[in-house]
């Protein structure tokens, strides 16, 4: 059996002795999180996508929200103390985070950017985030995620 290739996220969790489960699946190219959750039979509410934004100050911010939700840009900017923020352009994801689109996780980016996890994560024993590459997921306790990324919880989604 081939040895699992660890991503930066996995190495950081191992180094910090944080429990997590790794789930791998076949995936050769970017597929949205909802399609992956459907394919794997996973709950949308506990499956989180990682969004990277940039503020007017040129500072980067990381937000993790349930895959079917939309980031409330005004609320997110307010939470991080910016006048406004915008999504990081796809072509800049690797340069800023070290990860690729579809494999971006809040854990182990090139730098530790201010990170906000949607407060609904607290309702779950474990949430699912990307494992740091296509075809890899990390199941992790929300408080462990917040701790390892030095993040915080907040209400950062659009309410319809």
Image (spheres, helix red, strand yellow):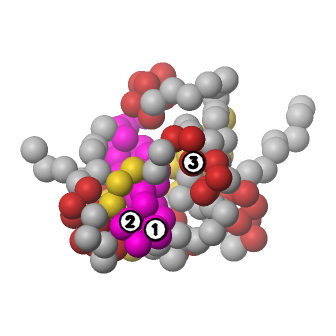
**Residues at circles 1 and 2 in contact by the CB criterion of under 8 Å:** yes
Inspect the magenta stretch and tell me whether residue 72 lies in it. Answer: no
Q: Give the range drawn in magenta.
A: 40-67
Q: Quick one: SS at disc 1?
A: loop
Q: How far apart are marks 1 and 2 (CA)?
A: 5 Å
Inspect the magenta stretch and tell me whether residue 53 lies in it. Answer: yes
* Position of the N terminus by quadrant: top right
Query: Which residue matches tag 1?
Result: 58
Q: Which of 150 and 80 is in front in this view?
A: 80
Tell me the crowding category of disc 3: few under 14, some 14 to 19, or many 20 or more residues within 10 angstroms, Cα based.
Answer: few
Going 47% across and 70% down the picture, which residue do you hit? 59
> Is 114 displayed left or right of 92 in the figure?
left
Q: Quick one: SS at disc 3?
A: helix
Q: Position of residue 11 (x, y in %)?
A: 75, 61
Q: Nearer the viewer, residue 94 or 143?
A: 94
> Is 108 displayed left or right of 145 in the figure?
right
Q: Which of 75 and 15 is in front in this view?
A: 75
Res 55 label:
2
Q: Where is residue 43 in the image (x, y as percent from the top left)?
A: 37, 37
Query: Which residue matches tag 3?
Result: 92
Q: Earlier in the sequence, mark 1 or mark 3?
A: 1
Q: Where is residue 54 in the image (x, y as percent from the top left)?
A: 43, 61
Q: In this view, does 103 lie above or below 85?
A: above
């Amino acid at each position: 059996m081939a040895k699992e290739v660890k991503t930066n996220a996995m190495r950081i969790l191992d180094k910090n002795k944080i429990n997590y489960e790794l789930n791998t699946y076949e995936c050769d190219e970017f597929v949205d999180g909802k399609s992956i959750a459907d394919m794997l039979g996973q709950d949308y509410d506990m499956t989180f996508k990682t969004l990277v934004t940039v503020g007017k100050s040129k500072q980067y911010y990381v937000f993790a929200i349930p895959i079917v939700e939309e980031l409330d840009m005004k609320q997110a900017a307010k939470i991080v103390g910016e006048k406004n923020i915008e999504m990081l352009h796809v072509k800049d994801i690797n340069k800023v985070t070290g990860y690729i689109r579809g494999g971006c996780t809040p854990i182990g980016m090139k730098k530790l950017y201010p990170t906000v996890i949607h407060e609904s994560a607290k309702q779950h024993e474990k949430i699912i985030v990307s494992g740091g590459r296509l075809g890899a997921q990390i199941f992790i306790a929300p408080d462990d995620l917040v701790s390892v990324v030095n993040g915080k919880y907040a209400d950062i989604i659009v309410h319809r």
